[in-house]
Structures are given as structure tokens and as C-alpha cells.
């Protein structure tokens, strides 16, 4: 899997933990914060750590967004700063943006302006998010004791139209399908159309896998990654 160039804006607890985990995964990370102490703390950990105010367009134009694969807005103390930084960055970066949500209102605003992905993390979630970014096709995963995990992936093409009762012939050794998750449309508090995920529960034998399904898998990390990339 090729390394990514990632810009993380905000080097507080979450941003610094996530940045460190991404570096451990082999990616290049540029960290940005307007707090000199945070920048100094991370300068020997990240590819680059830059002190600047991400709410100022003239300042962020000095960041090499043109070579970035992904931008993560990890600001966690100030909703206004997060939204302003995001608005400025969207003016010059048209790639994927992941933004941290601070509260319900902030989350709704991010939904309304169509951010690619919204997360509501604690610091310990940073490692899981870095792993998910690295594996690309895995939406979310949870490590279990030993070598096993539970992971969500978009449905592979070879499962579309297959009945659950006929699933065994399609599965890789060591991988089990637990259930599926579907998207349901709803309106947020600003009346913008958003989606929520609904777990299907126990699947009946005649369940037909649909192209919009998210599949919940159990198996080893190696087997799940192999299955997701078939």
C-alpha cells in the first residue's frame, strides 16, 4: 500500500496522537498548529511541524496542499476556529477532508457543508483511525484479543446479488460475515439531508446482498484485508 501525504491541522491530544499513529503506519505527516509549544513537541516526531494560524488564508497558502492526499481538521477546543480553518482550506484544497466534530451543533454544520467524513474521537481512537486510513477499504475496525478483529467494509462486487444461504462458497478461509449495515437518509437540525447507518441484525437465509450494503466481518486482520481486496 503506497504511503500517503497527510496534513493534520490541530496538534492537541487527538491531533498529536493521530499524527504519531499515521507516522507509525509509514505515512508522511505535516502537522499544523498556532501553539508553539505543541509544534515544538511534535517537530521531531512528524515529517514537518509548522506553527501558523490555519484560520488565515494567507498563512495556510504556505502549506503544500497541492501534494497532499488527505487533510484532517483535528482542532478540538474552538468550534469557530475549526469551521474557519475548514472554510479557508476548502478554498485551496479539493481533496478528501476529515473533520473532528466537537459537539452536536458543530457536527450538524459539518454535515451541512458536506465534509467527506466526520469523526467524534477520543485520543485512544487515533490509532484505529490511522489503521483504517492505511487499509483504505476498511471503514471501521475493532481489534479483539489475539490476532482477530471485527471490521466494516463496502460490499465487494463478488457478493452483490448473492443470497446469504449461498455465502459459504464465496468466503475466504478464516472470514465470517456477521451482518450488514445500510444507510438511511434523514434531515439534521438544519434541515440538510444526511445519512445514518442502521445495522440489519441476524440475516435470514434468503437475504440478498445489495450494492449499497456495508458488510460486518469477523476474522484475522490479514484475512480481512485479503478478502476486502479481492
Image: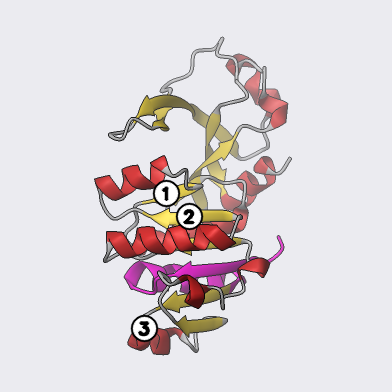
* 217 relative position to 190: left or right: right
71 in relation to 158, above or below: below
* Residue designated by label 2: 98
| Tag 1 secondary structure | strand
Residue in the picture at 67% in, 68% down: 67
**Residue 47 pos. (x, y %):** 57, 81
Is residue 21 highlighted in magenta? Answer: yes
* 170 relative position to 61: left or right: right
Which labelled disc corresponds to residue 118? 1
38 in relation to 105, above or below: below
217 in relation to 17, above or below: above
User: Badge 2, how many Cα within 10 Å: few under 14, some, many 20+?
Assistant: some
Q: Distance between the residues labelled 3 and 1?
A: 24 Å
The answer to whether mark 1 and mark 2 are in CB contact below 8 A is yes
Image quarter in which the C terminus is found = top right
* 187 relative position to 208: left or right: left
User: Is residue 132 among what the camera can see?
Assistant: no
Q: Give the range drawn in magenta.
A: 1-28
N-terminal of the pair, mark 1 or mark 2, is 2
Residue in the picture at 65% in, 42% down: 228
**Residue 187 pos. (x, y %):** 35, 28
User: Is residue 98 among what the camera can see?
Assistant: yes
N-terminal of the pair, mark 3 or mark 2, is 3
Residue in the picture at 52% in, 57% down: 90
Image quarter in which the N terminus is found = bottom right
* Residue designated by label 3: 38
Of 44 and 180, the residue lying toward us: 44
Of all residues, the one furthest to the front in this rendering is: 58
User: Badge 1, how many Cα within 10 Å: few under 14, some, many 20+?
Assistant: some
Amino acid at each position: 500500500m503506497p504511503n500517503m501525504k497527510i496534513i493534520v491541522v490541530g496538534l492537541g491530544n487527538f491531533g498529536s496522537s493521530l499524527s504519531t499513529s499515521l507516522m507509525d503506519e509509514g505515512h508522511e505527516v505535516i502537522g499544523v498548529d498556532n501553539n508553539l509549544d505543541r509544534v515544538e513537541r511534535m517537530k521531531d516526531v512528524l515529517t514537518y511541524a509548522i506553527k501558523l494560524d490555519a484560520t488565515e488564508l494567507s498563512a495556510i497558502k504556505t502549506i503544500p496542499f497541492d501534494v497532499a492526499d488527505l487533510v484532517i481538521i483535528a482542532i478540538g477546543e474552538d468550534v469557530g476556529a475549526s469551521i474557519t480553518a475548514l472554510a479557508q482550506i476548502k478554498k485551496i484544497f479539493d481533496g478528501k477532508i476529515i473533520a473532528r466534530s466537537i459537539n452536536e451543533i458543530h457536527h450538524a454544520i459539518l454535515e451541512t457543508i458536506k465534509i467527506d467524513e466526520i469523526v467524534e474521537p477520543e485520543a485512544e481512537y487515533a490509532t484505529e483511525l490511522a489503521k483504517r486510513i492505511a487499509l483504505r477499504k476498511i471503514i471501521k475496525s475493532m481489534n479483539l484479543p489475539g490476532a482477530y478483529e471485527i471490521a466494516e467494509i463496502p460490499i465487494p462486487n463478488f457478493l452483490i446479488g448473492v443470497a446469504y444461504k449461498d455465502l459459504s462458497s464465496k468466503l475466504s478461509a478464516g472470514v465470517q460475515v456477521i451482518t450488514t449495515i445500510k444507510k438511511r437518509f434523514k434531515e439534521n437540525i438544519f434541515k440538510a439531508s444526511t445519512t445514518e447507518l442502521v445495522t440489519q441484525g441476524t440475516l435470514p437465509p434468503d437475504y440478498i446482498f445489495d450494492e449499497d450494503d456495508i458488510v460486518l466481518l469477523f476474522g484475522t486482520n490479514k484475512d480481512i484485508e485479503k478478502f476486502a481486496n479481492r
